[in-house]
Image (cartoon, rainbow, N blue to C red):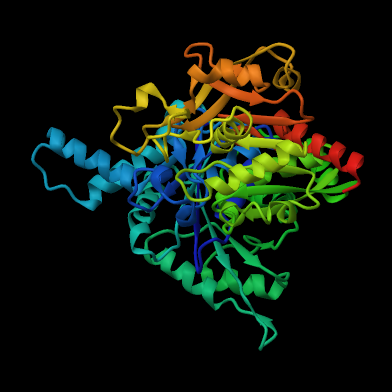
Amino acid sequence: MNTKYVFITGGVVSSLGKGIIAASLAKLLQARGLKVTIQKFDPYLNIDPGTLNPYEHGECYVTEDGAETDLDLGHYERFLGVYTSQANNVTTGKIYNTVISKEREGAYLGKTVQIVPHITDEIKRRMLLLGKTGNYDVILTEIGGTVGDMESQPFIEAVRQLQWELPEEDCMSIHLTLVPFLNAAKELKTKPTQHSVQMLQQGGVQPDVIICRTEYSLSDDLRRKIALFCNVKPGHVIQSIDAWSIYQVPLNMHDEHLDELVVRKLQIDNYRQPDLKEWCRFLENLRNPEKELTVALIGKYVSLQDAYKSIQEAITHAGAAYRFKVDVRSILSDDITEDNVAELLAGVSGVLVAPGFGERGLEGKIRAIRYVRENNIPFLGICLGMQMCVVEFARNVLGFKDAATAEVNPESSHLVIDMMEDQKKTTIKGGTMRLGAYECELLENTLAHRIYGRDIIVERHRHRYEFNASYKDDFEKAGMVCSGRNPQTGLTEIVELPQNSFFVGSQFHPEYKSTPERPHPLFVSFVKAAADFESKTGK
């Protein structure tokens, strides 16, 4: 069977959930026994989102091979339980960078370089790349942005050309749109969908399926109306009604026969009925918790929920593993003072200090960490959160009052967090951090070793700064154990306080590898420790 291609576009407004629809469809096809992957094409000119402020674009998701990518790739991996790669996220910046570099090399033999055919050819090459190298049955391609956006036009043109070049049974187009409910008129309106599809058709792409985001169920009459005016077959207009959880969406799409429509259009016959038993078990646990608890998430970007998307989801996965409903209390680290830290953390059963960069909010994180350490509240620090627990311990236990990270105070006499040696000569910001998966060797008879149950783990990184090894003896004599280290470089990956019930800092990002069906052990242990704390204290 040839590799099949499904292109997913969006219209009317942004943030409709193309990534969730793509991940849900991929999950259903995977459950039918097909080998599936998803790729995201983003229309912005950045090479990748690595240098973007999270308020601009949400979380920067890091893949196993070290790509800094769009947060939708996190959804892809969580739903499918398989890794994505550098090839799964392509931006306009990457496309133009490749084409201009080839032009400078003389690859176009003196021709005038244009959007068509040179930019569109490079887009098509990348759209087909995974199909030539990955042995996939189906590749879903999500086109970022909204149909009609100027920056999305080359991607729509590339899809048009591929629909013309590929056999008819090897590709299809799905368009996600909005059917708004006008409260004054008390009715759903289809005109925005009609206009969105017309705009897509003007670009030469005819959708095979239209998925309508809606707050209320679509009647058969409304579906027939959309099908008639948008030139799709009856039955190919399906609804994506607001769901109680993003993880319910695959089941909703199956009820709407989306996966059946796709395998029929693509003439796929080597499939089975979808096996979603594990997925349904997770949803059952998630929807029917037996216990509730509250944990605090402390960071500098908490006002945007997508800034810590993978952390939020990893907490959800871990809670469902124990049938806990975990409420996350987001606390802006800038707001934490010595006077209010106890009030802000009152009633929480665990505290997670989030990653980040820069000076803003660091002192608030340090105050919170001191409070939880001294009050034996379960603590998990990730990346910068781990680094700040090192700084806090150095200041308040070791007595190094000016202890700091070189990121914000390089003149400190106690740089307990310092820039990695191989980073000191780096001047380019984009894509130059320590990125992707690295080994970590766990020290026996430590909490980290008990949590993972193995000697060597592999976790993903995104940082320039590290625990300063010259202070290792000082910390361990005072009670902080370096329980995880990189076997090649000796870099400290995990610190913990054995005298506390649960106090762990990880230089890596465990949240990137948590899925509903395989919750990450660090998060599972953190949530369990929070539940135990609540039971003991009655909070």
Residue most extreme to the left: 110
Q: Residue at x 45, y 56 (%)?
A: 56
Relative to 239, residue 330 above or below: above
Q: Residue at x 78, y 49 (%)?
A: 348
**In the rendered view, does 32 fall on the left or right side of 138?**
right
Residue 263 image offset from top left, x and y in percent: 62, 43
Mark yes or no: residue 205 visible: yes
- The answer to which of 501 and 90 lies nearer the viewer is 501
Residue 72 image offset from top left, x and y in percent: 54, 46
Residue most extreme to the bottom: 184
Q: Quadrant of residue 68?
A: top left
Number of numbered discs overlaid on the protein picture:
0
Residue 155 image offset from top left, x and y in percent: 37, 52
Q: Residue at x 76, y 37 (%)?
A: 378
Q: Residue at x 47, y 14 (%)?
A: 489
Residue 476 image offset from top left, x and y in percent: 63, 18
- The answer to which of 134 and 435 lies nearer the viewer is 435
